[in-house]
Image (spheres, rainbow, N blue to C red):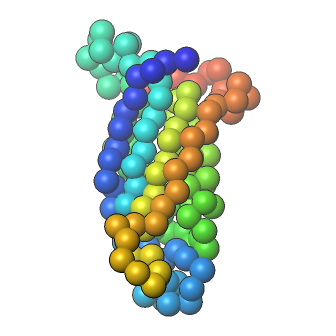
Amino acid sequence: MANDKIILAGLEFYAHHGCHPAEAELGQPFILDIELVLDLSPAGKTDDLKATINYDAVYRLVRTIVTEGRFHLLEALAETVAQKILVSFPVEEVMVRIKKPRAPLPGTIAYAGVEIRRRRKSTDFPDSYSKGR
């Protein structure tokens, strides 16, 4: 397994997730950190975008999931993001961290959040997937 990572940190989106009716109606910011684990040596040797993952495509996928979906739990949102990345890109592992800085709690906190890591199963991605990600 590779130790190399592509990191997208601090992706901020305004969305309507949460269990409380006000969260669904008013919305709030969500901040995501994404780590993609894969072998980056081919891209490092060739300096070719086709030898890596285009993180613009990852960003657009994550933005669509976060802003167009509706989840009660951060856990469900994180799982959906992780699974969509695993089936859309040839990564070995993905880490998704979601921060909710305006969580409706009776005190001051920096954020409430979740972090998950998911690994690819051998059946998750077809062998015929090209390197032109």
Position of the C terminus, as image quadrant, is top left
Q: Which image quadrant is residue 93 in? A: top right
Taking 17 as reference, is 49 left or right? Answer: left
Mark yes or no: residue 101 visible.
no
Position of the N terminus, as image quadrant, is top right
* Residue 2 image position (x, y, % from top left): 49, 18
Which residue in the rendered view is the most extreme toward the left? 47
Q: Residue at x 60, y 80 (%)?
A: 19
Taking 76 as reference, is 95 left or right? Answer: left
Depth check, front residue: 41 or 74: 74
Question: Is 25 located above or below residue 122 in the figure?
Answer: below
Mark yes or no: residue 105 visible.
yes
* Residue 90 image position (x, y, % from top left): 53, 29
Q: Residue at x 52, y 74 (%)?
A: 17
Q: Residue at x 61, y 46 (%)?
A: 83
Which residue in the rendered view is the most extreme toward the front? 107
Q: Which image quadrant is residue 123 in? A: top right
Depth check, front residue: 54 or 17: 17
Question: Is 26 located above or below residue 124 in the figure?
Answer: below
Depth check, front residue: 4 or 55: 4
Q: Residue at x 57, y 85 (%)?
A: 20
* Residue 11 image position (x, y, % from top left): 34, 55
